[in-house]
Image: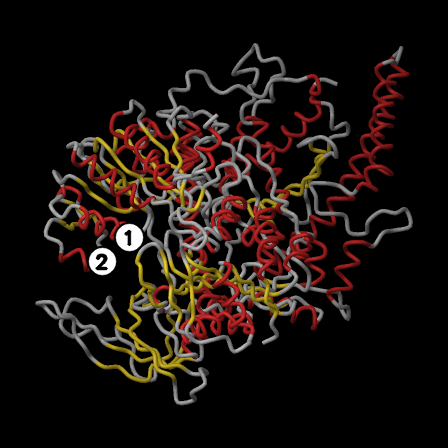
């Protein structure tokens, strides 16, 4: 009768290590041509990619790495060089100006080129899917690692899949699905629907591939992991690597009693804060909401925040570089940037959900995608969008929103047509939005700017 | 919906008239389009009830199916349709001009220029609404796999000779209509609502009568009133004064007029079959003909108003001058037409039911590129569209207030002049963002260097500093006219003018394992849909 006692004590480190070992075993010694790894936010996906790359290189297997953006590729190159400075690494880049991070030039064992032939013979070659697609007439690589595979479109995988024999696919199924600027309903339900994600095509044609899951989020605090897991990963739950009390956020300057200060204190104490503005239909760049977002950021900086976590024994100051603002639309991000500039704030990252994917901050301030809207379209309801925005933080997340989103959701149940042969995604955005909203309601600070 | 479109709709509401959403026409209109106004039978997908079709607005050809569930009558309808559509399509096949196309030489693998034929003009099909485009696709799908008695003497229900070919052409038109900016098959409501913003929702804009009521209301009436009347007004018998543009019909018409007429036709037909002698048969044939004539009249009464509305819509569109880059896009339609003509001539099988993985990915890539190209070209062709992009922060226009010559750092310094533009627009320019302007029809790129607030302060006017990057020739000094001068009005966009195509995909025979491997050879041609019990009444 020891089993219940064992289950009660969850050792996140051991659970993560077991998962990683199984993944590496299948990748290095398994018979399957592909291995798929689902990774929830902040579960050590990049660490896994770097480790798998090093082990494959150590085993003498020529390896190509496919990532989706240049920033992701550069980041992986830097991490590889940090882990093993002696490993010869190739960075294949485009022929545009400034194709890669200049920091790569300082690394002795990193060779950069716009031609794949120049990089032949190097243990690991990394590039974006778009650049790999132009590589023709070369000997296929024995192994590939495809990073952010759920954000890669099926047609992008089609363009590069002949370059490798076997591959490890790593990604986060809960983030934003790839999209197309034109309709692809014509192919909905086909196993190789070009606008679907690379992983769905891969698994439709190769259902027997081993699939693994990283079980622990090291980024999300204990206050956030259960909500994100329940709302966005109901069938593949994960845990936080840290416990309540492992991380704290404190401020040197006490609250002045204003809405922004109260919501900051609420978020510091509980991990979540909802700054609720009066209900109103507004244009996308709602000036009051934008100003509220900027004010919260300004106050976060002014109040001398300090973050304590498992990473270091001493509190680390909460600087502009550790704060991010997330929005749904680019014009909203631009409006927030302008408002921050007016308040004299620089160096805070302000971007859309699409561009914040894969990034990590101590505190995030989110303009709710449905705030002030008269309708809820599929774009604004997309599960992945809210998931990205709600899962970038290590300590706390403040959501700024107009009142009335709950009623709006009830007025607009999802009505997307169901296509034969496609996997219906669970949970749908409507349900996920309600789950998050219900949780945020417990941390609500009403404010009239 | 963009901000400018919302504003235009508000203005339409307050003025009672649709507002222009474009100053030029962004779609090609053929001098001799084939207008096709189809109706279908309720309750049975794709069963045609009738149509008006033709190129002469005063003399449309009326086709009707007196009993839409009778497959012989349906085939007769399709056969008659083929007799109108195919000669029209064929009329464009023979006039060709010489053109060049880049192809990969099978021996050397190099890209070479090949002399090919390009049809000098192409057919254009116009339907009233988007649902009409779907019907064209459905008809194509239902016909192209049919076998004629000549092709397959064993076929249980052989199709009339030209019907499968009509199916292939309609499929081609339907598939081409999915390419943004193409004009081989157009829906009148789509084209009209591209050029005018009404005071109703985009869903309501799909009602051709209501849309025209907003754009061109009767003398002294408001658009909203006229549109509501077009949607709802009924005569004493409860029939809509402005019948829906189809292909679906109004239920009141189905129940009160069509169903009884079809029943009379059925009874007359049964009676004729039961006739016992020649004299009786003659009488009953007369009754059958009368019943059929009645149904034809009903079909004409519901399609003729739509037919006239489509031509009126075309008249309105023709009043707009054609956009400068419309011709270029039409040339791509001509290529599309020419290549399908060649496939038909070469005896290739009909388009498969489902695209293989590579074809699907290629089509998606083409459509995404065409969408980006269309958005850029419409803005470049039309100051009103560009105004919308400027309002959205995706472009800016202004006056050049300063030009400072500068050079690149390389060994052979090239000109990289710094141009300061004063603008009232608020573009969303990121650090070192690329911007483009049209210089003699070609895009010239510049890099955003920095901004200063203009003399007004408070964000109204901004000074933007740009570094011009290309199109200045090879010399040390930029070619004349290639750099804007002080006092010039310039307009830069944040989007590219000529979107780049993606990488070439593998051939279908090389489909990778991730996508199921090569599709394999089609040994037998795809069969038509199996005949089910519902087909045999």
The residue identified by callout 1 is A70
Q: Secondary structure at mark 1?
A: helix
Q: Which mark is residue B30?
A: none
B16 and B107: which is toward the camera: B16
Residue B117 visible somewhere in the drawing: no
Residues under numbered marks 1 and 2 in contact, where contact means CB atoms less than 8 Å apart: yes
Q: Chain of mark 2?
A: A
**How dense is the environment of label 2, judged by Cα within 10 Å: few (below 14), some, or many (20 and up)?**
some
Residue A288 visible somewhere in the drawing: yes
Q: Chain of mark 1?
A: A
Quadrant of the image occupied by residue A118: top left
Q: Secondary structure at mark 2?
A: loop
When the figure is inspected, residue A60 is found, relative to residue B494, above or below; the finding is above
| Position in image of residue B145 (x %, y %) | 54, 23
Q: How is the image coloured?
A: secondary structure
Q: Looking at the image, which residue sits at the far left?
A: B411
Quadrant of the image occupied by residue B251: top right
Q: Which mark is residue A101?
A: 2
Quadrant for the C terminus of chain B, please. top right
Position of A27 with respect to B372 (left or right) is: left
| Position in image of residue A60 (x %, y %) | 15, 32
Q: Looking at the image, which residue sits at the far bottom?
A: B455
**How dense is the environment of label 1, judged by Cα within 10 Å: few (below 14), some, or many (20 and up)?**
many
Quadrant for the N terminus of chain B, please. bottom right
């Amino acid at each position: 009768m020891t089993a219940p006692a064992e289950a009660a004590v969850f050792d996140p480190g051991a659970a993560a290590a077991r998962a990683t070992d199984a993944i590496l075993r299948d990748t290095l010694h398994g018979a399957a041509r592909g291995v798929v790894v689902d990774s929830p936010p902040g579960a050590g996906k990049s660490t896994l990619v770097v480790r798998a790359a090093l082990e494959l290189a150590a085993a003498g297997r020529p390896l190509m790495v496919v990532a989706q953006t240049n920033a992701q590729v550069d980041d992986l190159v830097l991490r590889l060089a940090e882990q093993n400075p002696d490993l010869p690494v190739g960075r294949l880049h485009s022929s545009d100006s400034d194709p890669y991070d200049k920091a790569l030039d300082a690394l002795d064992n990193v060779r950069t080129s716009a031609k794949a032939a120049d990089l032949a013979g190097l243990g690991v070659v990394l590039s974006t899917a778009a650049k790999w697609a132009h590589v023709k007439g070369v000997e296929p690589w024995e192994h590939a690692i495809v990073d952010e595979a759920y954000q890669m479109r099926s047609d992008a995988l089609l363009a590069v899949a002949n370059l490798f024999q076997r591959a490890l696919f790593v990604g986060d199924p809960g983030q934003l699905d790839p999209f197309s600027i034109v309709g692809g309903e014509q192919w909905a339900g086909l196993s190789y629907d070009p606008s679907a994600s690379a992983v769905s095509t891969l698994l439709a044609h190769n259902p027997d591939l081993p699939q693994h899951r990283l079980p622990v989020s090291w980024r999300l605090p204990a206050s956030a992991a259960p909500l994100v897991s329940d709302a966005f990963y109901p069938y593949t739950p994960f845990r936080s690597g840290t416990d309540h009390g492992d991380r704290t956020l404190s401020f040197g300057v006490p609250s002045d009693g204003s809405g922004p200060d109260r919501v900051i204190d609420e978020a510091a104490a509980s991990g979540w804060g909802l700054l609720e503005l009066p209900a109103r239909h507004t244009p996308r760049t709602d000036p009051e909401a934008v100003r509220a977002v900027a004010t919260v950021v300004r106050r976060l900086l002014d109040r001398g925040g300090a973050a304590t976590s498992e990473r270091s024994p001493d509190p680390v100051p909460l600087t502009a570089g550790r704060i991010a603002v997330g929005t749904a639309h680019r014009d909203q991000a631009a409006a927030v940037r302008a408002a921050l500039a007016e308040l004299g704030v620089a160096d805070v990252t302000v971007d859309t959900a699409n561009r914040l994917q894969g990034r990590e901050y101590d505190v995030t301030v989110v303009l709710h995608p449905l705030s002030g809207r008269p309708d809820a379209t599929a774009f604004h309801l997309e599960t992945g969008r809210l998931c990205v925005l709600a899962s970038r933080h290590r300590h706390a997340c403040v959501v700024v929103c107009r009142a009335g989103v709950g009623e709006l959701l009830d007025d607009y149940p999802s009505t997307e047509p169901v296509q034969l042969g496609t996997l219906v995604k669970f949970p749908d955005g409507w349900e996920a939005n309600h789950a998050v909203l219900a949780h945020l309601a417990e941390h609500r600070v009403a404010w009239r700017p | 919906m963009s901000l400018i479109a919302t504003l235009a709709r508000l203005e339409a509401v307050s003025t009672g008239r649709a507002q222009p959403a474009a100053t030029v026409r962004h779609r090609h209109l053929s001098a001799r389009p084939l207008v096709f106004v189809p109706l279908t039978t309720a309750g049975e997908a794709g069963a045609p009830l009738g149509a008006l079709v033709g190129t002469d607005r005063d003399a449309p050809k009326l086709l009707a199916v007196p009993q839409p569930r009778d497959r012989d009558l349906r085939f007769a309808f399709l056969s008659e349709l083929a007799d109108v559509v195919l000669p029209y399509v064929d009329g464009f096949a023979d006039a060709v001009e010489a053109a060049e196309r880049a192809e990969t030489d099978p021996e050397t693998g190099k890209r070479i220029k090949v002399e090919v034929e390009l049809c000098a003009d192409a057919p254009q099909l116009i339907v009233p609404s988007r649902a009409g485009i779907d019907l064209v696709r459905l008809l194509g799908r239902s016909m192209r796999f049919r076998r004629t008695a000549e092709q397959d003497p064993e076929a249980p229900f052989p199709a009339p000779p030209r019907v499968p070919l009509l199916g292939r052409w309609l499929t081609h038109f339907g598939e081409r209509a999915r390419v943004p900016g193409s004009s081989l098959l157009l829906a009148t409501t789509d084209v009209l609502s591209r050029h005018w913003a009404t005071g109703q929702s985009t869903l309501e804009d799909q009602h051709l009568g209501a849309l025209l009521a907003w754009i061109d209301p009767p003398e002294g009436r408001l658009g909203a009133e006229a549109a509501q009347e077009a949607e709802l007004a009924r005569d004493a018998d409860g029939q809509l004064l402005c019948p829906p543009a189809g292909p679906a019909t109004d239920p009141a018409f189905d129940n009160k007029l069509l169903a009884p007429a079809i029943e009379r036709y059925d009874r007359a037909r049964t009676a004729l079959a039961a006739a016992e002698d020649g004299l009786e048969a003659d009488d009953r044939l007369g009754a059958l003909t009368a019943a059929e004539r009645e149904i034809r009249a009903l079909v004409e009464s519901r399609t003729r108003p739509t037919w006239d509305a489509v031509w009126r819509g075309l008249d309105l569109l023709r009043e707009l001058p054609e956009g400068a880059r419309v011709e270029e896009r039409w040339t791509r339609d001509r290529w599309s037409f020419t290549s399908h003509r060649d496939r038909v001539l070469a005896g290739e099988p009909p388009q498969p039911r489902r695209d293989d993985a590579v074809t699907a990915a290629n089509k998606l890539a083409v459509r995404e590129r065409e969408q980006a190209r269309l958005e850029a070209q419409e803005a470049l062709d039309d100051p009103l569209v560009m105004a919308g992009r400027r309002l959205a922060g995706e472009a800016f226009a202004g006056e050049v207030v300063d030009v400072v010559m500068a050079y690149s750092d390389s060994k052979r310094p090239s000109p990289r002049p710094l141009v300061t533009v004063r603008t009232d627009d608020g573009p969303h320019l990121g650090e070192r963002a690329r911007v483009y302007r049209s210089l003699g029809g070609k895009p010239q790129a510049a890099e955003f260097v920095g901004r200063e607030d203009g003399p007004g302060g408070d964000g109204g006017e901004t000074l933007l500093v740009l570094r011009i990057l290309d199109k200045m020739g090879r010399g040390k000094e930029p070619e004349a006219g290639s750099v804007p001068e002080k006092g010039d009005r310039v307009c830069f966009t944040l989007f590219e003018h000529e979107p780049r195509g993606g990488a070439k995909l593998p051939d279908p025979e090389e489909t990778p394992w991730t996508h199921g491997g090569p599709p394999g050879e089609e040994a037998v041609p795809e069969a038509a849909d199996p005949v089910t019990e519902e087909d045999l009444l």
